[in-house]
Image (spheres, rainbow, N blue to C red):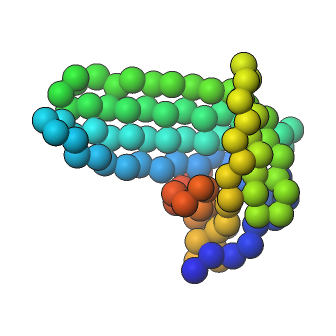
Amino acid sequence: MTSGAGDNASLVGVWLNVVVIQVPGDLQTWTTTWQFDTAGTCRQTVEIESLAEGFPRITERACTFVVTGGDVAISFVGGGTLTFAFSFAGFSPDRLVLDGFEYQRQT
């Protein structure tokens, strides 16, 4: 199932999750990318593409992060801190489970 988490180094890299959502009268693709670096800074990019609108909406948020056991505390520039549980699916260092959503490591 999942393995335990580690320190900041275990999260370093670029992680991608894509979810397709059907809502009344529309089909949306939500692409979330997290980029974590060795200095403890991060960036969350969310791209929502709606078939009804026909163009993507992109939101980027700069942040910092600290890993404590199996949790990561993410503090966004401009305010707000979230703490997510994380682990690695199937004991793979390339399959991050962050707050219940699986992300694939990008190369």
Image coordinates of residue 60 in percent, x first then y, are 57, 25
Q: Quadrant of residue 53?
A: top left
Nearest the camera: 82 or 47?
Answer: 82
On screen, residue 22 above or below 95: above
**For residue 40, above or below residue 92:** above
| x, y percent for residue 10 | 77, 59
Q: Which residue lies most toward the top here? A: 78
Outermost residue, left side: 25
Q: Quadrant of residue 95?
A: bottom right
Which of these two is toward me, 100 or 51?
100
Q: Tell me if I can see residue 67 in this picture.
A: yes
Residue 33, position as x, y percentages in the image: 54, 41
Residue 49 is left or right of residue 95, and the answer is: left
Nearest the viewer among 16 and 85 is: 85
Q: Is residue 37 visible?
A: no
Residue occupying the point 74% across, 40% down: 74
Residue extending farthest to the bottom is: 1
Tell me what residue is drawn at x 72 percent, y 48 percent.
Answer: 83
Q: Give the residue displayed 22% in from the left and 41% down from the top.
A: 23
Residue 13 vertical position relative to residue 47 in the rendered view, above or below: below
The quadrant in which the N terminus is found is bottom right
- Which image quarter: residue 92? bottom right
Residue at 71% from the left image edge and 30% from the top image edge: 80
Give above or below for 55 relative to 20.
Answer: above
Residue 46 position within the rendered picture, expressed as x and y whole percent measured from the top left = 49, 34
Q: How many marks?
A: 0
